[in-house]
Image: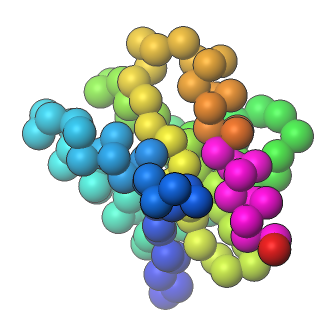
């Protein structure tokens, strides 16, 4: 059984938006986030067959949303096929402006891809 690597994207300034968001969550949802991340490590792209992850529409391949609809959290994730690694980009609550949060996530994805391809 393959174990997938799941890491938080670290920006050039050293900040890790997804990790920082996860750490800031209260204990009512943090354990659920960690369970979903463990599922992602164990199951990788097969998690797309569940309600836990879905493709984020748009031009970027491998761009997904890890989520728990009942608890209302989302984490934008990029699947780097070259390294079989999932990159956590940005987290938010579903009551926030979805389009704005996706745009922030997409900007972080493009920033990551720029640095990854150097």
Q: Residue at point 43% right, 72% down? A: 42
- Examine the structure image and report whether residue 29 is included in the region drawn in magenta: no
The residue most toward the front is: 13
Q: Nearer the viewer, residue 49 or 83?
A: 83
Q: Is residue 82 above or below residue 57?
A: below
Residue 74 falls left or right of residue 118: left
**Most common secondary structure along the magenta stretch:** helix
Q: Is residue 60 above or below residue 68?
A: below
Q: Nearer the viewer, residue 84 or 70?
A: 84
Residue 26 falls left or right of residue 77: left
In this figure, which colouring scheme has been used for the structure?
rainbow
Return the x and y of residue 5 as percentages of the image width and height: 49, 76
Q: Is residue 84 above or below residue 32?
A: below
Q: How many marks?
A: 0
The magenta span reads: 108-117
Q: Residue at point 52% right, 56% down? A: 13
The residue most toward the left is: 27
Q: Nearer the viewer, residue 91 or 111?
A: 111
Return the x and y of residue 47 as percentages of the image width and height: 54, 56
Q: Residue at point 19% right, 49% down? A: 31
The residue most toward the bottom is: 1
Can see residue 92?
A: yes
- Examine the structure image and report whether residue 112 is included in the region drawn in magenta: yes
Return the x and y of residue 11 as percentages of the image width and height: 55, 56
Residue 56 falls left or right of residue 41: right
Return the x and y of residue 109 as percentages of the image width and height: 69, 49
Q: Is residue 104 above or below residue 88?
A: above
Can see residue 52?
A: no
């Amino acid at each position: 059984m393959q174990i997938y690597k799941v890491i938080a994207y670290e920006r050039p300034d050293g900040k890790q938006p997804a990790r920082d968001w996860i750490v800031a969550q209260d204990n009512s949802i943090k354990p659920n986030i960690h369970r979903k991340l463990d599922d992602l490590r164990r199951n990788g792209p097969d998690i797309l067959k569940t309600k836990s992850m879905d493709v984020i529409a748009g031009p970027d391949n491998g761009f997904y949303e890890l989520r728990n609809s009942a608890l209302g959290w989302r984490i934008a994730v990029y699947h780097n096929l070259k390294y079989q690694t999932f990159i956590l980009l940005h987290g938010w609550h579903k009551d926030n402006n979805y389009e704005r949060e996706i745009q922030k996530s997409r900007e972080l994805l493009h920033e990551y891809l720029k640095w990854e391809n150097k």
